[in-house]
Amino acid sequence: MRSSTQKSTTAPAPADSPGPGPGRGATAPGDAPLDELDELDYLLITALQTSPRAEWAQIGKALGVDGSTAARRWNRLTEAGHAWLSCYTVASGVTLPIIAFIDVDCAAGALHEVAAEIADDPHLITIEHVTGSRDLVLTAAFPDQAMLARYVGFRLGALPGVAATRSQIATAVHTEGSRWRLDRLDPDSQDALTRDRGPSHPRRGLTAPDDLDNRLYLLLSEDFRRPAARLAERLGVSPSTVRRRLDRMHREDALIYRCEVARYLSGWPISVTLWGIAPAADTARIASQLIGMRETRLCASLSGPYNLMLAVWLRSAEEIGAFEARLATRFPELVVADRAVTLWPLKLAGHVLDPYGRHLRGVPVTFWEDPGARRAEDALLARLRGGRKG
């Protein structure tokens, strides 16, 4: 059931970490303490990363346990905030959305207030407090450039504590976190599960989602493992209608499923973002090899002065230099121009996390709309139309 090349990695809870919440204190016989994961936990997380929607009986069979044990273990992990599932779509509409990476500089002492203010912005997929020349790095989805400009100019730019912002658009997202795996399963166990690796091409999404599609998205973001009958009950439609809608969403690559694990327990506790410069003629080849590296969580081509962005998880801070040395040897034409280590992953794939990467709550991923920002933009447009007076 497990790879012979990887061993279980556990980490003690930090001394100042929050204690268990209501219902989190008990440990069932045969379970690891709540401040660490055992091998079955790692196998279960890997199984759900491989096939997030598989039935518990199927998952249990692949792991050599019964389905009820797998379900109980998963409930325990989610209650502790150590692992969680997410579902979202950023591809809905006639055109593909814009993925933007936004650097935010904050005034002294204002970083956490700014982060708390934007945590519920629904289009912000990730928010990271990082080292280096920026305070926050945001990953966001927008329907078009105009909405990106509105958000940066009239939302972020108007927030007390925001000193400056810099934006880059992803011209291509070569891979993202939903395709990263712990890889604890052996080949036989992997074959027992349906792999949901996701398409290698850009997700097409639904060209004309209606109100029912959007309501279904929101329910799936809460719990995409709910049976069709329960979804139908919440939506006030028949189960067959829900199944048809789900089948259509899957055919059109409209849904992104993820299973995440608190990074300090994952065995890969260090997250590093690298910004690189590569010759335009070589970027596609380099990106195709970068996404095959074990450490890679995100790889994107960018519109700005750095034309490649790479986010990796590493096993220790000491590996940062060694990883960059490997890049230099393998890709001598790639220049790493900047780097940042994540100090606090405040938000990941639409979920708010504590400083150790434990799950706190979900924020459904949708496109942002703010009447106040629109009014401010309309006022500016009125001034531009009127021109100078006198």
Image (spheres, grey):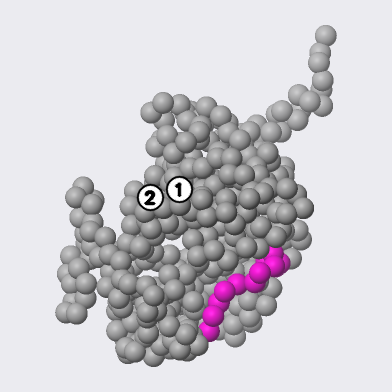
Q: Tell me the magenta residue range.
A: 194-206
Q: In the rendering, at what x and y percent does residue 158 appear?
A: 56, 30
Using the image as rendered, state which of residue 128 and residue 76 is in the foreground.
128
In this orientation, does residue 280 appear?
yes
Per the image, the residue denoted by label 2 is: 318
Tell me the SS state at disc 1.
helix
In this orientation, does residue 212 appear?
no
**Is residue 201 a member of the stretch shown in magenta?**
yes
In screen coordinates, is 159 left or right of 359?
right
In screen coordinates, is 39 left or right of 49?
left
**Is residue 150 a member of the stretch shown in magenta?**
no
Query: How many numbered discs, if any?
Result: 2
Residue 44 sits above or below residue 118 on the image: below
Using the image as rendered, state which of residue 47 and residue 145 is in the foreground.
47
Q: Amino acid at mark 2?
A: Glu
Near mark 1 (Cα within 10 A), the count class, few <14, some 14-19 or many ≥20, is few
Quadrant location, the N terminus: bottom left
Q: In the rendering, at what x and y percent does residue 386 appear?
A: 81, 22
Magenta: main secondary structure equals loop
Spatial separation of the CA atoms under disc 1 and disc 2: 7 Å
Are discs 1 and 2 less than 8 Å apart at CB? yes
Per the image, the residue denoted by label 1 is: 321
In screen coordinates, is 168 left or right of 192?
right
Q: Residue at x 70, y 54 (%)?
A: 283
Q: Residue at x 53, y 84 (%)?
A: 194
Q: Residue at x 44, y 73 (%)?
A: 183
Using the image as rendered, state which of residue 241 and residue 172 is in the foreground.
172
Q: In the rendering, at what x and y percent does residue 272 appear?
A: 47, 49
Residue 293 sits above or below residue 162 on the image: below
